[in-house]
Every structure is written in C-alpha cells, then in structure tokens.
Amino acid sequence: MIFTEQEIKWIRSEVTASDKTKYITDNLLAFIYEKKLFKLIVPEEVNGFMLSFPEAIRTFQEASRIDGTFGWLVTIGSGGGMFVPNFTEEVAKIYYSPKQAVIAGSGFPAGTAKKVDGGYIVNGEWFYCSGSQYASIFTATCKVESSGSEKHSQLLSFIFEPEQVKVIEDWNAIGLKGTSSHTISITDQFVPDYRTFSIIKKQNNNYLDNIYDFPFLMFSEASFTAIVFGIGEHFLETVQHFLKEKKSLWGDDRYTLIDKIYKREKAHWCKARNLFYDQVYDSWKKHLQNKRLTVKEQEYFGFTCRKAVSTVLTCVDTLFRLIGMQAVKEESLINRIWRDLHTAAQHAFLTPQTKEDISPLT
C-alpha cells in the first residue's frame, strides 16, 4: 500500500485534532473506507485486498509512520479480517462485504453467556475496544455457563450489532487519543446461534488464504511491532527536521553532539528493523512451504519483536532527553509522537517477559 506525499500531509492534518477531540474526523474515516484500509486481509470476494503477511506488516508500519493513531486504527481494523475463516460463509458475506465494514471488540473472555432457545443471553464488559467510534459490528468472547454435567466453561465468541452495545468512553491514555479504545458493555442481549463463532476453530467456508493458517500470536506480535517501528520512524524524521531548524541557534558543539547521537540511534533502529523483517519474511517463507513453525521458532519470533520494541523505545528516549523544552510541550508534534509510541508499546503482546527482552540492540 503506497500513500502519496499529498495524502500523507492531508492525513496528518486531519488526525492532529484527535489529540483533543478523541475522535477521528468523518473525512479521514471516509478516506479509510475508500482505500479499503480496514480490509487489507479480507478476501476479494467480500471486497477486500487480501495482502500477504509481509505486505500487511509493511503497510501497518507505513500507516503508523504517517501517524500513530492512523496506523493503530488501520492495524486494529485490518486485524478483524483474520476472523473471516471463523465465520460461516453466509455470515462472512453479511458482515465483511459492506464498504464500511469494520470490527471492534476483544478476545478476552470477560463476559458470560447463557444458552437459551435459538441462541444465548450475553452479559459483560470488555476493555480497550479500539475503533468503537465507528464499528459496524462488535465481537467479544464469553464463558458459556456450564450445565450440571459439564466441569468446565466453554469459550465462545459473539457478534453484536452496534445497537446492542453500550460504549463507555473511558479511553484516557497519554497517547493514541483518537483511537476510541473504549470499554464496551453488554447487558442481557440475545445473540442468535448463527452470530456465534470460535476464535480457535475455523469454519468450512471457501474463503481460504495462507495468512489465515499463519500462527495468530505471531501475526499479532508482528502487527503491533510494526506500529512501534512506524511511530519510531516518524519520531526520527521529526527530530531530523528539528535539528536542521535549530542548527544555527545551538552552535556547532551542541549540534554536532546531538547529530552524532541521532545517527547512532537511527542505526540502532535500522538494525532492529532489519532483524525484525528477516524474521517476518523467513517465517512466511517457511509457512508457504508448508513447514510447520516449531514452538521454539514461534517463541524466538516473539522475542525478536519484544527486543525490537525495546530498541526503538531506547532510541527515541535517548533523543527525547537531548531536544530540550520543545519535547515536553503537549501541543508539540514531537511530544505527541513520543506519547503515541509509549502508549502503543504497552500492548500486552509487546510486554517484556525476560531481562533479555528489555535490553536494546546495540
């Protein structure tokens, strides 16, 4: 997916206000629909693009380089396409075909469902449902109340129409303010059987693609890592412009010092990016060759993602310290990018699990 310089400039101007309004504009949303940016991994049969895994990850990074909020929403919105094979073919046509189709929701089993004739009665609350401002449907996972003969609760996911959902506008993070990552609440809502699905089990439908058989955890880890790389790249570009503007004011000594550190940190960012994409392309190549990715390979992929994110954060924070007061002004672009980056990097898939995860590449 290629964006023109004119489009990039326009997107950035449209999304700037979202830091205060906490909404993206109707114009930007219309642009996303027109470009099918929520349908990057949706089959062409239901009006999607059906990018490969590496192509999707590259697009997530580029969208995030343009702007963190824009990239986050494109990535989250596209991620819903991974559920196409989990829906029946009929249901997939209904909910993915419309031009404005996009899913918001959560896979965390924070709700309960009770079986009744023809469906289920659902209750629950789910946090961090990005895109709740404009979602055409919501999906959420529940524990199904067990009968007397069952020892364990079954997990099942549900499709909700927007009118069934109460959006609690509680997203108040330091960054990515326009992503409408709010809590959703469901109270005594009936969901018919045909609007249920398993996030693990695939249906026997004709919407087949190699990406749907790729390990979902690896897809998710790569997606959010790409967002971090994109926002980090935007930060580096902005700092470079800032350095040029300040060169005559700072004097040679300060400028030379910061420029040297900037080049060093950018080299670290590039090294981390290259290692990350080596993993992306190698794992996809093996997948296409029907070589099952081992548990060890999948774990190393996750490790690469977490270490890459630690590297980007270190690069950005090192430069942030050197910029001066401009960096701490909330209305400044540098500050907003920094806040978006640190918000994105807090995602559970990117949280360090070992001491080695925290250490940046050098």
Image: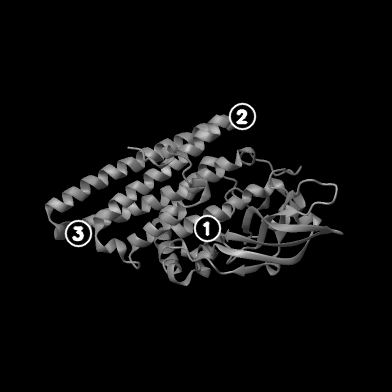
Where, by quadrant of the figure, is residue 296 drawn?
top right
Relative horizontal placement of residue 143, taking residue 327 as reference (left or right): right
Relative horizontal placement of residue 117, taking residue 331 as reference (left or right): right
Amino acid on which the number 2 mark rests in the picture? Arg
Tell me the quadrant of the picture where the C terminus can be found: top left
Amino acid on which the number 1 mark rests in the picture? Leu
Position of residue 163 measured from the top left corner of the image (x, y, whole percent): 69, 69
- Disc assigned to residue 90: none
- Residue 281 or residue 129, whichever sits in front: 129
Dot 1 corresponds to which residue? Answer: 73
Where, by quadrant of the figure, is residue 161 drawn?
bottom right
Real-space Cα distance between discs 1 and 3? 33 Å
Relative horizontal placement of residue 225, taking residue 142 as reference (left or right): left
Q: Is residue 41 above or below residue 288?
A: below
Dot 3 corresponds to which residue? Answer: 246
Q: Earlier in the sequence, mark 2 or mark 1?
A: 1
Dot 2 corresponds to which residue? Answer: 292
Label 1, secondary structure: give it.
Answer: helix
Number of other residues with Cα within 10 Å of mark 1, as a class: few under 14, some 14 to 19, many 20 or more: many
Residue 283 seen = yes
Position of residue 31 measured from the top left corner of the image (x, y, whole percent): 52, 62
Residue 1 seen = no
2 and 1 marks in contact (CB < 8 Å): no
Number of other residues with Cα within 10 Å of mark 2, as a class: few under 14, some 14 to 19, many 20 or more: few
Amino acid on which the number 3 mark rests in the picture? Lys
